[in-house]
């Protein structure tokens, strides 16, 4: 009995030793060298794994940064310019500084201005709704209101407004990762420059229908009147498919287009209220006719 137990122990020990040797040989033969700089860069990156850089995660982005000679076009939106400067210092490479951006919602179709005409009874996700029908309103371009963008935001920078039925973007929390942009099936979320004090001017509509049809489906829809394009002094407004678009690079935030838009489809954010224009009353200038009094001429009798 004792011999059989000892034999079993020796057999198991021998198998363990053989397995250890095999694993050691295999690990040496198939060993993949990893540049230690990858770990250094990965430690600096924010670790959000948001895919905003174009890579599936921070580790893969670190590998790409280390193995790419020219990284001037590569950027971590969450870490921003400060993180990319640290990466450049470690790798001895040059990076291009980029202006910070923030997500904006290009739809104002709240419940008040875009009434529902149908009711969907299926699963409440934007992806499914976009595939099987055009939405609960007559506008087939606006927000579906099921909150897929909110579910993918890892930074709690979005929430659904129950009153308007639209998502709200918290600018201070937005890291410009672009996850909401990728998730939206209607492409109504866009990354635009944050600018100083987060001043922005953009068209809050994507309806490409002609004026009358667009206005019928949504009271604040762009009707393609081109008034904003005509008044813009910098040619920042272009008309494409009955829809106005404001180029954020050319726009100087003069807001002339905001004032002239007949449907108020152009959104301005964080501007101070405009001072009312002083109305100067025109005085009626009455020309007084000169009266000439007759001269009393004395004549000698």
Image (spheres, grey):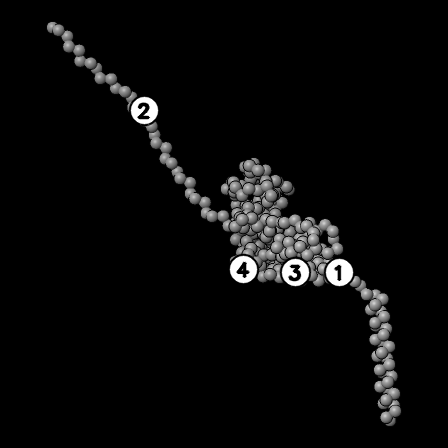
Query: Which of the marked residues, 3 or 2, is nearer the chain's N terminus?
Result: 3
Q: Nearer the viewer, residue 299 or 269?
A: 269
- Residue 169, position as x, y percentages in the image: 57, 56
- Residue 28, position as x, y percentages in the image: 83, 68
What secondary structure is marked by label 2?
loop
Q: Nearer the viewer, residue 156 or 28?
A: 28
Q: Nearer the viewer, residue 204 or 9?
A: 9
Query: Which of the marked residues, 2 or 1, is nearer the chain's N terminus?
Result: 1
Query: In the rendered image of this protein, does residue 138 appear above or below residue 289?
Result: below
Distance from label 3 to label 2 (Cα)? 81 Å
Q: Would you say 274 lies left or right of 178 here?
A: left
Q: Would you say 100 lies left or right of 20 here?
A: left
Q: Which residue is mark 4?
A: 162
Mark 1 neighbour density, 10 Å: few (under 14) some (14–19) many (20 or more): few
- Residue 154, position as x, y percentages in the image: 62, 61
Q: Who's the residue at 86% across and 89% down the image?
A: 6
Q: Which residue is mark 2?
A: 287
Q: Which residue is mark 3?
A: 44
What secondary structure is marked by label 3?
helix
Q: Which residue is mark 1?
A: 35
Distance from label 4 to label 1 (Cα)? 50 Å
**Quarter occupied by residue 176:** bottom right
Q: Nearer the viewer, residue 279 or 209?
A: 279
Q: Nearer the viewer, mark 3 or mark 4?
A: 3
Distance from label 3 to label 4 (Cα)? 39 Å
Distance from label 2 to label 4 (Cα)? 64 Å
């Amino acid at each position: 009995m004792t011999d059989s137990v000892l034999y079993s122990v020796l057999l198991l020990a021998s198998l363990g030793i053989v397995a250890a040797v095999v694993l050691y040989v295999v690990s040496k033969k198939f060993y993949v060298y990893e540049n230690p700089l990858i770990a250094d860069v990965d430690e600096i990156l924010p670790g959000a794994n948001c895919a905003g850089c174009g890579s599936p995660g921070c580790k893969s982005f670190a590998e790409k940064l280390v193995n790419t000679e020219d990284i001037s076009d590569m950027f971590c939106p969450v870490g921003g310019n400060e993180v990319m400067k640290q990466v450049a210092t470690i790798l001895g490479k040059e990076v291009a500084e980029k202006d910070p951006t923030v997500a904006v919602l290009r739809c104002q179709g709240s419940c008040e201005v875009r009434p529902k005409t149908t009711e969907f009874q299926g699963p409440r996700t934007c992806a499914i709704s976009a595939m099987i029908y055009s939405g609960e309103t007559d506008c087939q371009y606006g927000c579906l209101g099921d909150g897929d963008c909110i579910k993918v935001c890892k930074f709690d920078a979005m929430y659904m407004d129950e009153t308007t039925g639209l998502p709200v973007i918290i600018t201070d929390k937005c890291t410009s990762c672009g996850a909401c942009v990728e998730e939206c099936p209607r492409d109504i979320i866009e990354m635009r420059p944050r600018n100083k004090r987060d001043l922005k001017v953009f068209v809050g509509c994507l309806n490409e229908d002609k004026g009358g049809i667009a206005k019928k489906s949504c009271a604040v829809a762009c009707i393609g009147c081109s008034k904003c394009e005509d008044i813009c002094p910098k040619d920042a407004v272009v008309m494409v498919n009955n829809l106005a678009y404001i180029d954020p690079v050319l726009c100087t935030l003069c807001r002339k287009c905001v004032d002239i838009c007949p449907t108020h489809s152009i959104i301005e954010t964080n501007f101070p209220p405009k001072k009312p224009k002083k109305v100067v009353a025109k005085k009626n200038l009455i020309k007084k006719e000169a009266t000439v009094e007759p001269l009393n001429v004395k004549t000698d009798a």
